[in-house]
Image (spheres, rainbow, N blue to C red):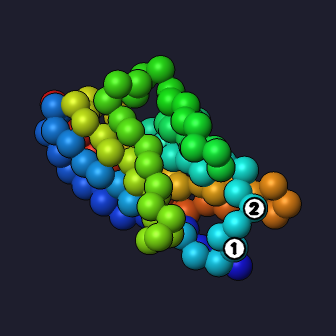
Amino acid sequence: QVQLVESGGGLVQAGGSLRLSCAYSGIISGINTMGWYRQGSGKQRELVARITSSGGTNYADSVKGRFTISTDNAKNTMYLQMNSLKPEDTAVYYCNRNYVVYGEYWGKGTLVTVSS
């Protein structure tokens, strides 16, 4: 069984920074990709950043140069460093793990609110 637990969300002023964490447990190997998604109020869930099993990354155009995705395999944790936050970054942020064989799993999300 796979468990994903996000943390690090909160209220921050525009221009500020937050670091989200996703602690994962259960099936560790066989990952296709890991990523962060977000869903703003009244919006569809969208990809924010993703990292492949080989370490390649890709980002949504709206966060390029501001957000950085990383992993610490020793701690079974994935991070999203968010800098220069904007009000439009306000959303619930979800952690995702996509397995080659087992499909994908989601965390319950952590709320990020950026005030203007």
Q: Amino acid at mark 2?
A: Gly
Which residue occupies 39% across, 60% down? 21
CB contact under 8 Å: marks 2 and 1: yes
Q: Residue at x 16, y 38 (%)?
A: 16
Which residue does the image show at 75% across and 61% down from the upper left? Answer: 30
The location of residue 105, given as percent across then percent down, is 67, 61
Residue furthest top as drawn = 61
Identify residue for label 2: 30
Q: CA distance from mark 2 to mark 1?
A: 8 Å
What secondary structure is found at the residue carrying circle 1? loop
Quarter-of-image position of residue 64: top left
Q: Quadrant of the N terminus?
A: bottom right
Residue under numbered circle 1: 27
Does residue 30 lie above or below 39 as drawn?
Answer: below
Quick one: SS at disc 2?
loop
Percent x, y of residue 88:
33, 29
- Location of the C terminus (image quadrant): top left
Amino acid identity at mark 1: Ile
Left or right, 30 with respect to 109, comes to right
How far from the left and from the top, in percent, is residue 51? 57, 43
